[in-house]
Amino acid sequence: MIDDEDSVRNAMSFILDMADLPSRSYASALEFLDVAGSIREGCVVTDLRMPHMSGLELITRMKQLGLGLPVVMISGHGDIPIAVEAMRAGVVDFIEKPFKKDALLDAIRRALDSEASRAAAQSSRSRFEEMIATLSPRQTDVLRGVIAGKMNKTIANELGINIRTVEVHRAHVMSKTHAASLSELVRVAMSAGF
């Protein structure tokens, strides 16, 4: 959590400790950015208005550095345009001070859930990309046809091969990607951006 007010950081630390959510606190965005590269998981809770760098500027800087941690923003000066701007910047939630303990915890849990979903999707995508790398060029062509919803006969005609060859390549694709069904193959391939 990042806030220039000691009392706010102390209160948030206490709330998170009581909820069994480990935390680290920073007095400024710059202090956080000094160590941000070593943080691989969790979420960032930051104040909107801080000296030297605002919460919105912090989000921009995090994106430039490739830090994909979810962000919960808090502010004592929140208004609708600022909240909208924060959400457009990618903030998971925007909470006004003074906030209730449960509102903060709910926002952090949503952020952690979104982080877990993002990490799982990235892991799935990476696994699928590794599997795709094992396909021959012809198997990759067949996979593209399958994902496009084409019948084996159409794929065969487009590639200039016979239907039986398409079936064999398709079976190899299913085996190499560990897909249990055609729908699973298509779903995983689409989620991987193939």
Image: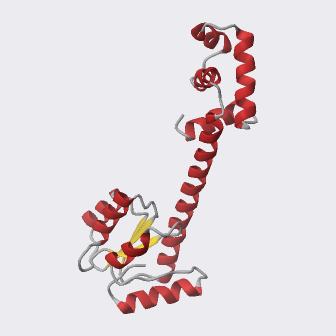
User: Who is closer to the viewer here, 117 or 53?
Assistant: 53
Residue 172: percent from the left, percent from the top? 74, 26
Q: Is residue 172 left or right of residue 53?
A: right
User: Who is closer to the viewer here, 4 or 65?
Assistant: 65
Please tell me whether residue 135 is drawn above or below residue 121 in the rendered image: above
Residue 82: percent from the left, percent from the top? 27, 66
Residue 190: percent from the left, percent from the top? 56, 36
Q: Is residue 179 left or right of residue 148?
A: right
User: Who is closer to the viewer here, 9 or 36?
Assistant: 36
User: Which residue is depicted at the point 59% across and 26% down?
Assistant: 147
Looking at the picture, the colour scheme in use is: secondary structure
Please tell me whether residue 88 is drawn above or below residue 160 in the rendered image: below
User: Which residue is depicted at the point 61% across and 11% down?
Assistant: 154
Tally the marks.
Answer: 0
Quarter of the view holding residue 152: top right
Q: Is residue 176 left or right of residue 113?
A: right
Quarter of the view holding residue 175: top right
User: Who is closer to the viewer here, 37 or 119?
Assistant: 37
Please tell me whether residue 6 is drawn above or below residue 165 in the rendered image: below
Q: Looking at the rendering, in which quadrant would you find the C terminus?
A: top right
Residue 41: percent from the left, percent from the top? 54, 67
Q: Looking at the rendering, in which quadrant would you find the N terminus?
A: bottom left
User: Which residue is depicted at the point 32% across and 68% down?
Assistant: 58
Please tell me whether residue 123 is drawn above or below residue 10 in the rendered image: above
Quarter of the view holding residue 80: bottom left
User: Which residue is depicted at the point 57% across and 10% down?
Assistant: 158
